[in-house]
Amino acid sequence: MLENAPFLTSANTTLARLTSEFSELADTLDRLGAAADARTASRAAGLKSRLQSFSPRITLVGQVKAGKSALTNVLAASPGLLPSDVNPWTSVVTTLAINTRAPADPTGPANTKARFTFFNRDEWDNLVVNGGRLGELAERAGAEDELIEIQRQIDTMRKTTEARLGKHFELLLGQNHSYGYVDHELVERYVCLGDGPDLSDAGAATGRFADITKSAEFYLDVPEYDFSMTLCDTPGVNDTFLIREQITLRSLRNSDLCVVVLSAHQALTTVDLALMRIISNLENRQIILFVNRIDELNDPMAQIPEIRAGIEQTLKKFNIGPDVAVIFGSAKWAEASLTASMRLLSPDSQHALTAYASSRPESKSESGWETMWNLSGVPDLLEAIGERVCEGTGKRQLERTRRSARNLANEARAKAVAARQPSRVVNIKLGEGGAAAAMRELSTRFETEVATLCQRLRDDLSQRMQTAEASFVKRATDSLVTYLEQHGEQGTWNYDPTGLRVLHRTAYASFSRALAAKVSTLYGEAASHVQGLYLAVLGDELADFSVEPPHPPRVPAPVGLGRTIALDLQSTWWRRWWQKRRGASAYAKDYAQLISAEVHAISKEIEDSQVAAVLENTRATLRDFLREHEETISRITNADASTDEKAEDRLAGFRSGGDANTTFSEILKGLEEMAA
């Protein structure tokens, strides 16, 4: 029980308008469903369900020991739930779904509160046999010593894990465990790696399943929030094995916002270069930097401007613009204020709080706990999250649902008109097969066109990336040959891959713009033809009838462009690699092969993990749109429909003596006013 849980309600202010609009739209969908036939009512209910299940995904990334888990606990109103002192080997992604229900699981409890998913056999083998991503990289480069060290460490982990789980090990891979509750002890069992010989004991609680746990999902109710959100706490990125980098990339692909948690003591040090490469591929407004642990600074007010200046300089270096929010705070102060307890704060932390409060009079409140809450930076973080949800993913969800609702209301109007004059509608012929056949032809035509467009967009992106890679490899190889001819094997030769990443990012941005423009045009053409078909069927009964095109799918940020490649590593393996070859031409040939494989892996991952998915979504969106209208037109014009279906379609909205067409017109007017 949190003593000061109401402090969290400050988050509701920023999102108040959005939640109100969501609620108003949900009520409109209820009205639409109540006035329409069974099929339309079902689709309206589906739109409402998707609207109500909206939960922006916020991923927290950053350094090991920066306080990501402690900050996540505060945002989830659950101090102490996630362990903040996890062994660095742990690579568990932890998701906290706030104010949302868990998906139905026939093997789990009726009201699931915690679910843990284990690595499957292929994932486990890739980790413990190949050494994961760094093992692949080291093997490709011929870095035997590094590869041997990787294998030694992961072999130790493998033996410990198999000894701990015994005969259950093989059975657990690929499985999941679900519970109807969640607490700290349960989390420790699946997420924390403990220390000591007792871990081999089958009854040991801490860390029993941690090695094989891939992800943990918790479903929490926080009544202080008027909205839902999903927090994703990733392992720290300071990882010798690059396992965490892979996990961070995977988590960010589906995220709406990224909160980068840094330590005030080492904000944006060299260990964050990989992190900067990753987030530089996000939209600036998707990024929030939270500089944690200011409670450990000697003089926060004096030191924060210096730290901020350093951060801004680093962001500028990575071409990350000024739209990025930079917030300073302390998860410890936030937790202390929520729990109304000073036991977490050291004397130095309390002294820093007092000094900081005296220099920030605008944060002062009648309650000392509330003053501490204001100084913790968490209210500012919640406000920044709210602003970005309102202008980004929340706005897109609202517009998408309104557009679908308007189309649904117009379809319902068409059915109401058809119900009043069934014989006239049925007898209208559009070509030999009538309206239904014409609609099927439209569906076939536009599904073919969108498939062709998607393939063209993908081929163009692939060609641009391959051209960039070939150019980069040639420049880098020429640079290496020149260096070797001038200096031999003396000194250190480096080549910055930033140029390649810029070219890749430019190609991806061009793909994103082309997809948005060309898909919007194609969707618009399809909607225009469908609208024309409705008007041909209904005549001048609905002069203001319209069909709106669906929203083109959003293209996710190319976070994979930030992954580490061989050129990013500054280690002794390069010198040993050189020593095994004789002559500049041999260096150049082998080097070109190595870097070609590395850089091609980047573009292939982007194509396979993101481009393919967004293009399939593009096709599916249009396919679903056309199929829905195909079914509606078939129902309107099908004289052979069963009596029950015809009665349901034609009599809906008239049961209370009202005019369905008028009702749907009013609903449409309301939707247009909401959009305005």
Image (spheres, rainbow, N blue to C red):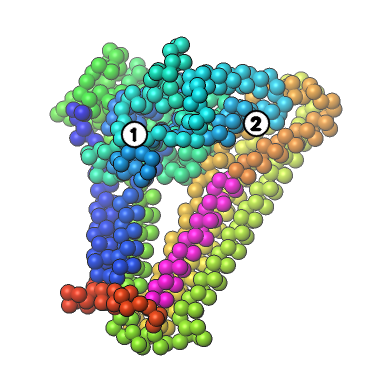
Q: Is residue 31 above or below residue 305?
A: below
Tag 1: amino acid: Tyr
- Res 378 quadrant in image: top left
Query: Distance of mark 1 from mark 2, alpha carbons?
Result: 37 Å
Is residue 87 visible from the viewing direction of this image? yes
- Res 448 quadrant in image: bottom right
Is residue 74 visible from the viewing direction of this image? no
Q: Residue furthest top?
A: 197
Neighbours of disc 2 within 10 Å: few (<14), some (14-19), many (20+): some
Q: Nearer the viewer, residue 645 or 46?
A: 645
Select label 1 or label 2 by which is in front: 1
Q: Is residue 134 above or below residue 647?
A: above
SS at circle 2: helix
Q: Which residue is mark 1?
A: 179
Range of residues picked out in magenta: 606-635
Residue 660: x, y in percent? 25, 75
Q: Which residue is at a point 43% across and 63% down the rendered structure image?
A: 550
Residue 570 belongs to magenta span? no
Tag 2: amino acid: Glu
Q: Which residue is at a point 32% across and 54% down the rendered structure image?
A: 49
Question: On residue 136, which mark appears?
Answer: 2
Please identify the quadrant where the C terminus is shown: bottom left
Residue 292: x, y in percent? 37, 26
